[in-house]
Image: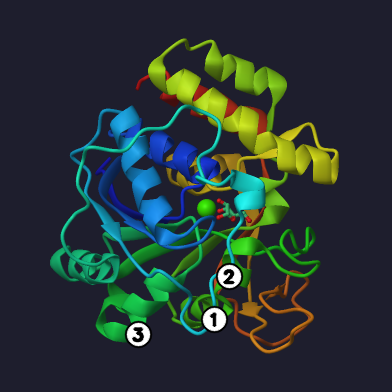
Amino acid sequence: MSRRKIIIDTDPGQDDAVAILLALASPEELDLLAITCVAGNVPLHRTQTNARIVLEAAGRTDVPVYAGCPAPLHRPLVTAEHVHGKTGLDGPELWEPQMPLAEGSAVDAIIEALRSHDPGTVTLCTLGPLTNIAAAFNTAPDIISRVQEVVMMGGAYFEVGNITPAAEFNIYVDPEAAEIVFKSGAPITVMPLDVTHKVLATRPRIEAIRALDSRVGHFTAEMLDFFERFDVEKYGSEGGPLHDPCVIAWLLRPELFSGRHVNVEVETRSDLTLGMTVADWWRVTDRTPNALFIGDADADGFFELLTQRLARL
Ligand code: RIB
Ligand code: CA
């Protein structure tokens, strides 16, 4: 099977970090071309720093890290330090990364990658607000038809919102960018809160990762120790939802997931429901389906995959 070329667009964030580690631990299936960073969970200077820290923790400083958009297309940045801590990667002891940022912007890197590789061979894995992707599509519309698939963590339908009563964070931060991506015509697979809230890093699952007794195992467990507290306090759940790693797990073992190909549109005007993803799950409209909207996952299978792969790093 040929390796799938991917770009991870991300706002690390502990769950983003675990997704990056899962991708790095899967070189037979995935060829990670670049990490492009966006402002989201924390400001851009932290997300690009955190991405480099994660690569250094995994010993993979060969992967280029690009800094992208420091703010949404048309709105002030909203961040989530209340979830991820001030650094965005609270939990483990952090350091100032030695590897440099790659030259050039994330938006140009995304455009260049899609233009230089054969059409339909590069997948965009988006783990944060969609600002970089929308900016790339706006700047170079020719790349849209060259995208193999956009696999995004974002949105919600049955789970509704996590940053407002109506909206999931990644979509809420830049709803106009999300609208551009959903209306682009690119093939889209969505990992919404509906599925990520079923993939909980419970205490036994975190301890299984810690028991790997490796640098990456301890780094990951310490991130998850911190990351769980917000959702456990808010939802009374048994652990923190591992949102972003669902994107990578989809590429590795799609059979772990199930969903429907439906129409998804984004609210960009109403103050009350700004950033809401309106998924026509029950097909009550004649709006054209534009996304595979994932609703369920085999959580045990997911954590078995994650733990086995992290053991490789
Ligand atoms: O709503 C969850 C999403 O927002 C995740 O990607 C998390 O990292 C934050 O970016
Ligand atoms: Ca994220």
Against 83, is 275 above or below? below
Tell me the element at label 3. helix
Front residue (pair 183, 50):
50
Give the labeled residue for mark 2. Answer: 173
Front residue (pair 206, 290):
206
Foreground mark, 3 or 2, reads 2
Question: Neighbour class for label 3 at 10 Å: few (<14), some, many (≥20)?
Answer: some
Q: Which residue type carries mark 1? A: Arg
Question: Neighbour class for label 2 at 10 Å: few (<14), some, many (≥20)?
Answer: many
Give the labeled residue for mark 3. Answer: 138
Residue 12 visible within the image: yes
How far apart are the alpha carbons under marks 3 and 2? 18 Å
**Number of numbered discs visible in the structure rendering:** 3
Give the labeled residue for mark 1. Answer: 75
Mark 1 touches mark 2? (CB < 8 Å): yes
Residue occupying the point 46% across, 81% down: 73
Q: Which residue type carries mark 2? A: Val
Residue 308 visible within the image: no
Which numbered circle lies on residue 224? none
Reading the chain from its start, which is encountered first: label 3 or label 2? Answer: 3
